[in-house]
């Protein structure tokens, strides 16, 4: 902002006089950059869940959340992350993580902002959601630190290049070198603007459906301290589903009420009751699920003969991983 403002003030008279269209574009661009940098909190949305299989509804959650956050005028969503749960979750009917990761990657291959992360599902044991949030928080922080270091060295190299250009110019060799130095400087400025925006104010939020709030009432499924950490340090973006009353769940829970300002509720006006459970049921009965899941995901399922009567019985005799720790209640489960 400090760098852009003087430049913008410098071109303001030209803008008023309606002179060069290129200058007009520059001024408008600078104005947009300064407003965006000063006004928006940047958000990364993380969705944890089984994704067994990933459905169009899972993808819609990201779009609904982004639309709602942008409409507030306070936020700019810069990334969405899908994190499938590992095999250690022990959920009935849960197929191998490698298949769920592959399907999620196929489903998001045409998205410019939603990506799939395999860290959680690669762990040998089940990872509580709070630990997944910590991992991604640290990963984001490390990335920003690395960018700052890179910027420092880029700036140092650029200063040396400008000094060399100035010396060459004084000796009569400066025309082409000066142009090259200017072009290089502009190239370096672009990632610097992006990095500044990331480091200025970036928050990680857990994206979920209203059934997550319902799961708070399930005994031995949550640690109170984990819930508090998630709500206080990260926050929720919760998408309502048909028949759910998220506001009622918040009102009836003292803990949720305490952190209600960190829970962003998003109404799904175009109701969509697609669920992975219903998709699996239709598949094992030989019924069509076309247009309920991405075509590439359906092709993958058919090619690998997934979701049969036999696969639905997988883990049927095993308790869900969080419930296996009843003596030490665990953090809340994956819920998508």
Image: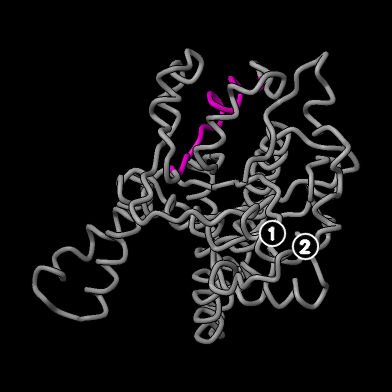
| Residue 122 x, y percent position in the rendering | 85, 50
Magenta stretch encompasses residue 31: no
Q: Earlier in the sequence, mark 2 or mark 1?
A: 1
**Disc number placed over residue 307 in the picture, else none:** 2
- In the image, residue 119 sits, relative to residue 318, either above or below, namely below
Kindly check if marks 2 and 1 are in contact, taking CB atoms under 8 A apart as contact.
Answer: yes
Which percent across, then down, holds residue 81?
Answer: 62, 53
Answer few, some or many: residues within 10 Å of disc 2's Cα (few below 14, many 20 plus, some between 14 and 19): many
Is residue 302 positioned above or below 317 on the image?
below
Residue farthest front in this picture: 285
Query: 41 or 304, which is in the foreground?
Result: 304
Magenta extent? 226-240
Regarding residue 309, the answer to whether it shows in the image is yes
Does residue 80 sit above or below 241 in this rendering? below
Residue plotted at (80% across, 18% down): 326
Instruction: Identify which residue, 164 or 196, lies in the foreground.
Output: 196
């Amino acid at each position: 902002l400090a760098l852009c403002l003087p430049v913008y003030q410098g071109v303001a008279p030209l803008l008023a006089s309606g002179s060069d269209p290129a200058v007009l574009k520059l001024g408008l661009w600078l104005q947009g950059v300064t407003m965006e940098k000063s006004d928006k909190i940047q958000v990364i949305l993380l969705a944890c869940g089984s994704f067994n299989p990933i459905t169009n509804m899972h993808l819609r959650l990201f779009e609904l959340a982004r639309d709602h956050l942008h409409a507030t005028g306070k936020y700019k969503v810069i990334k969405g992350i899908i994190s499938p749960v590992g095999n250690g979750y022990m959920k009935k009917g849960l197929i191998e993580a490698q298949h769920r990761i592959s399907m999620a990657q196929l489903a998001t291959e045409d998205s410019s902002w939603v990506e799939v992360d395999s860290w959680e599902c690669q762990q040998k044991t089940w990872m509580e959601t709070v630990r997944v949030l910590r991992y991604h928080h640290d990963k984001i922080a490390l990335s920003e630190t690395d960018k700052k270091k890179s910027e420092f060295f880029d700036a140092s190299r650029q200063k040396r290049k400008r000094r060399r250009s100035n010396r060459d110019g004084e000796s009569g060799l400066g025309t082409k070198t000066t142009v090259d130095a200017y072009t290089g400087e502009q190239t370096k400025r672009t990632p610097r603007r992006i990095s500044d925006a990331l480091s200025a104010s970036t928050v990680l939020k857990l994206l979920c459906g209203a059934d997550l709030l319902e799961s708070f009432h399930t005994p031995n499924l949550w640690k109170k301290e984990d819930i508090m950490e998630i709500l206080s340090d990260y926050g929720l973006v919760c998408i309502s589903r048909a028949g759910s009353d998220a506001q009622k769940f918040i009102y009836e829970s003292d803990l949720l009420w305490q952190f209600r300002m960190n829970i962003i509720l998003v109404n799904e006006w175009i109701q969509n009751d697609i669920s992975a459970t219903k998709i699996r049921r239709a598949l094992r009965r030989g019924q069509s699920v076309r247009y309920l899941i991405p075509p590439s995901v359906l092709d993958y399922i058919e090619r690998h003969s997934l979701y049969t009567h036999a696969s639905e019985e997988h883990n049927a005799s095993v308790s869900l991983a969080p419930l296996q720790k009843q003596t030490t209640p665990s953090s809340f489960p994956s819920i998508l």
